[in-house]
Amino acid sequence: MIDTRRLRTLRAVADHRTVTAAAAALHLTPSAVSQQLVALEHEVGHRLLERDGRGVRLTAVGRILLGHANEVLAQLERAEADIAAYTTGTAGEVKAASFATAIGLVVAPAVGALRSKEPGIQVRVLDAEGDQSLTMVLDGAVDVAVAVEYRGAPAEDDRRLSRIPLYSEPFDMVLPGDHPLARGSGEPGEPGKPGEPGDPDESGAARREVAVADLAGETWIGPYPGNPCHDVIALACENAGFTPEFAHSSDNFSAVVALAAAGAGVAMVPRLALRAADLSGVVVRPVAGPERRVFAAVRRGAERHPLLVPLLDALTDAAADLRRIPPC
């Protein structure tokens, strides 16, 4: 008989790639994790892990077992949800992790709605970037993640997670007021607004989207590597044929805009994040292509839990007004 606790340990090691990191996520000692893995190997009669540099990776048998582990653990989540539903389960605490912009735009309104509709449900909110929040869900540290699609994120058909689309937002280019590409979007200090194709402004220049390729060779300001938005920006530039040079880094988009206003470089910022920024001294231009796609995620099988269903519904309702986002 395979112990399901050991299956959770196997999945944590597969996710984190080291015994030490998996132990920290599971709140166990590395020795305890190693012992569970050895016991699991005895149960199945095969090696499940092998060395990979400083970490470990699954063997072929380990990958087979992990696939079954994901199904087993999802079914256990469903069982817990059904039992909770049977016993009403309308009171309790839910932990949600989200990046800062989404906390203000969808999580806080959802929490406010739940206070009147489901007063027995208490939501505890943690600020975490999109890549961190998904790991927190998988590790059981939180129940819900509000996360961003990024290169390397779990795929939509990942058997460990259930995803609920919330909204997507375009990125805008933030340019110093005296930048050559700022012409045709209003005076410096005034956010640029796209008009009809070919519609001239006072200077006779046509208002148009900025092409990412036009920013090759520029000095860039952006989030740190590891931030999902950094990955979206880097990928958009790679698709345009160049690698951006990030001379200045901040995960705070208001700081990014302030640096652009000081002439330190150009930036690509999610449109909704600009609402909290001081746009004086910069010109904002729409840019074709990159988007920040935001979704909620729970462990597969938990989407029916009576404590989570109202929160997921409230998040979806709060996001409804964000699906058509006008330029700044």
Image (cartoon, rainbow, N blue to C red):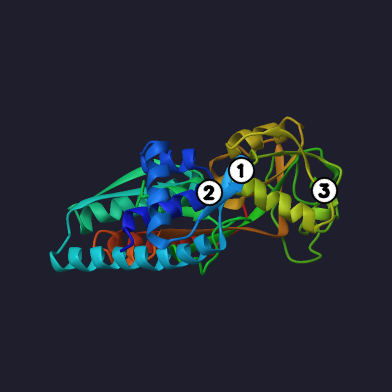
Residue 230 pos. (x, y %): 65, 46
What residue is pinned by disc 2? 131
Do the residues bearing badges 1 and 2 touch, measured as CB atoms within 8 Å? yes
Callouts 3 and 2 close, C-beta under 8 Å: no
Camera-near label (3 vs 2) is 2
Name the residue rendered at 50%, 51% in the picture: 15
> Of the residues under marks 3 and 2, which one precedes in the sequence?
2
Q: Is residue 264 left or right of residue 45?
A: right
Q: Secondary structure under badge 2?
A: helix
Image point (22%, 69%), residue name: 82
Confirm whether residue 106 shows in the render.
no
Depth check: 184 or 59 in front?
Answer: 59
In this rendered view, identify the residue nearer to me: 20 or 175. 20
Residue matched to label 3? 215
Residue farthest to the left, as pictured? 87
Identify which amino acid the numbered label 3 is placed on.
Leu
Binning the other alpha carbons within 10 Å of mark 1 as few (below 14), some (14 to 19) or many (20 upward) gives: few
Asked if residue 258 can be seen in this view, the reply is yes
| Label 3 element class | helix
User: According to the image, label 1 marks what residue?
Assistant: 226
- Where's the N terminus, which quadrant? bottom left
Residue displayed at 37% across by 40% down: 32
Comparing labels 1 and 3, the label whose residue is closer to the camera:
1
Relative height, residue 8 to residue 99 (above, below): below
